[in-house]
Amino acid sequence: MISTKSFIWPSICLLLLVAGPVFGQKQGRKEKKQRQQEQATAALAAKQEDPRDKEASESFFIDGLKFMMLEDYPKALERFQKAYTINPVNAALNYKLAETIMMMGRPNDAVSFAQAAVNLDAANPYYYLLLAQLYNGQQRYDDAIKTLTKLTKDIPNTDQYLFNLADMYMAQKRYDDALKTYDRIEKQYGFLEEIAYKKQQIYLRQNNLDKALQEGQNLIASDPSEARYTLVQAEMLANNKKTEEAIALINKVLQQEPTNAQARLMLADLYKQKGNLGESEKNLKLAFSYPSMDVDTKVKILVEYIRQLPMPPAQPNPELESMALELANMTVKAHPQEAKAYAVAGDVQAIARKKNEAQASYLKALRLDNSHFKIWQQIVFIDAELMQTDSMIVHTEKALELFPNQAMLWFYNGTGHLLKKNPSKGVKSLEYGKKLAVDNADLQTQFNIQLGDAYQAMKDYPKSDAAYESVLAVDPNNAHVLNNYSYYLSLRGANLNKAKSMSEKLVKAHPKEATYLDTHGWVLYKLKDYAGARKYLEEAIALKKDADLLEHYGDVLFQLGEKDQAVQQWVKAKSLGKGSELIDKKIKDKQLYE
């Protein structure tokens, strides 16, 4: 039921509640103002005696409460405002107006109503709390603190709000006031773990380590069997370079709880800081062996190892790798149904150059949870690195069922089909993936490189040339394209001067690469520059003996009139088990066929 006390609008109400004179006014003016206020109050009181007005105001108020419950704040506000026009000095009504306006996202407009609610009913704690909340939202922190201070001081049985007051002092870094408030709380409620921790944090911020440690001792004394209190104290000692004291406290915990994983981890870290790696690793392994240590903590530690491990092609760190691999194996043994355990083990094994083991770990992770794209990606990378083309095709196709918009998967799928001598399938995947990589210039280049090779295999030379040209437009020194493009032009006998220009550029940049020397030599051969071809092919053979290269060299020698030497090179090429379709005929007939 709404109170029927008679008041006026909050602005007038505040004047009524002020007992002293208004500064700058003469006594006569003050008395006149007071009489006017008394008359206004009397008029309002007379109005409120009308039972019809009282009933209407209460009806609007109840309707407003109903709409508040339905979270229909605009309608609630409309009803409360109608009640307010009849009875503007009802405390509960002002409170609900403030609350409604705040819920509508207009906290600044709500403040005056919250202030009025407190002034009209100074015994209701909820009114103070709302007002303090609104002050805090306006960053009027001093006003918020004053409001909560008045609440906890003047209204009985409001000690629970001291926690709010202390939090506000903490937010304003008024640490001494916060400590005094926490003392009041402890006086009322006794020793509380939460308060001890908060006081401890204040002392640390004030660089008062002794008092912070004393609070820690109070916590330990409150329950000596609670290992957590002792470990927090040890951590504080460790953070302040009191390593030996910290180790001593941790060992006390381990005497009571020998399989406390957190204590072992802390010891491992402290011994590492001291340079005692043997004790550090021993405690770390013990922690990993305890059932109480969860998989997420283990994964987090292994991720730290991964960050420290040298990535290929850097020189490995055998000791670090050995420790990381052992911890990874312990993790998968302890958590055989956790995909993340196998995934992190795969990461460690991959960095440690144990590709087959990494592949097996990633596949186990996917059997438990196939929803992580990065694991699929790692498997495909390993397939490509190990030249396991069939696996690469199978894995990319399975992954594409889950991640059809990942361009990288289409790239490796297309590459796999090219390697399996199925260029038409390769082109399909590569063209589709290229559309998905429209915002990735580097990946677009990779697609075009593969498409150049694929269209060449399909003898669609215009599209092959166009793909290669697209690469050279953005990367004119791309070695793969300069080599393949010039070589394929030479095989086709097309645009040989362009082929020579590209292969010449390539060997200047890579004078010790046998494949590129062979390509340039073969381009010169097609241009009938046999002496030049011989020079580059001999340089290539000095670096590497390859069937194709030796056969090319034999062809050049034949053109130079050295037929017996040419046949010898063809025989050498044949002995390597490879060569062109014509090599047997060349050897048998001792004749050059092209």
Image: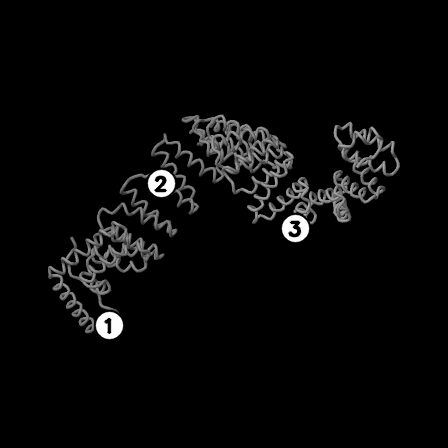
Q: CA distance from mark 1 to mark 2?
A: 53 Å
How is colour applied across the structure in the image?
A: one colour
Q: Earlier in the sequence, mark 1 or mark 2?
A: 1
Q: Earlier in the sequence, mark 3 or mark 1?
A: 1
Decide if residue 133 is on the left or right side of residue 365. left
Residue 47 drawn at (x, y percent): 13, 64
Amino acid tagged 3: Val
Residue 360, picture quadrant: top right
Q: Looking at the image, can residue 364 be seen?
A: yes
Q: Secondary structure at mark 2?
A: helix
Q: Residue furthest right?
A: 561
Amino acid tagged 2: Ala
Residue 492 drawn at (x, y percent): 74, 43
Q: Nearer the viewer, mark 3 or mark 1?
A: 3
The answer to whether the residues at label 1 and label 2 have Cβ atoms under 8 Å apart is no
Residue 21, picture quadrant: bottom left
Decide if residue 342 is on the left or right side of residue 533. left
Question: Which residue does the numbered mark 2 point to in the structure image?
Answer: 196
Question: Which residue does the numbered mark 3 point to in the structure image?
Answer: 474
Residue 35 drawn at (x, y percent): 16, 70
Amino acid tagged 1: Gln
